[in-house]
Amino acid sequence: MPVRLTTLDDYPRLPAPREDATTFEGNAKLKALHYARFAGCWTLADDSGLEVDALDGNPGVHSARYDGNACDPAANNAKLIRELAGVPPRNRTARFRCAIALANPNEILATGLGVVEGVIIDDALGGNGFGYDPHFFVPEFGVT
């Protein structure tokens, strides 16, 4: 059976879905169904973000717009570090959480979840990441 892979770039008129679920899995499901119905084919979608224990799980599902601006990583990181001022390193535990969902135009077929544990550091490190990556340190590997 032949498979044709497409991306959002192949659908320039695709309206953005509402991402108003309270979990990453919920938003991944919303996006997968939205795109599957629009494209008329199976669709894989994701939603991910950063959860910081000292901030009661924030930024969470609002990670991309944490500072209130439309996807401004520098502003999001600045707000994160501001809000953690005075919090000792041992209390800066955090995790990146990523949920994926596979859907056909009628239903969700499967979901998955991945989690990476780490801590938030004040000084940005590394140059290969994006978003919160420069401030998310993974002690197990010694890298951001």
Image (tube, grey):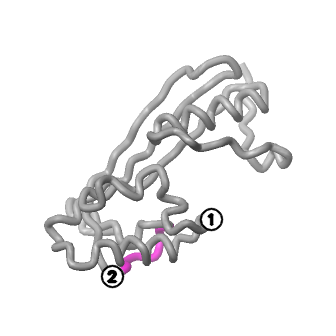
Identity of the residue drawn at 72% across and 37% down: 5
Q: Quadrant of the N terminus?
A: top right
**Residue 36 position in % (x across, y down):** 71, 29
Which mark lies nearer to you, 2 or 1?
1
Q: Name the residue under label 2.
A: 123
Q: Which residue lies furthest to the right in this view?
A: 13
The local crowd at label 2, few if under 14, some if 14 to 19, many if 20 or more residues have their Cα within 10 Å, is few
The local crowd at label 1, few if under 14, some if 14 to 19, many if 20 or more residues have their Cα within 10 Å, is few
Q: Mark 1 points at which residue?
A: 70
- Quick one: 18 or 12, which is closer to the camera? 18
User: Taking 22 as reference, is 144 left or right?
Assistant: left
Q: Quadrant of the C terminus?
A: bottom left
Magenta region: which residues?
A: 124-130
**Residue 53 position in % (x across, y down):** 25, 56
Residue 79's place in the image compared with 62, above or below, is below
> Which of pointers 2 and 1 lies earlier in the amino acid sequence?
1
**Residue 94 position in % (x across, y down):** 28, 58
Quarter of image, res 78:
bottom left
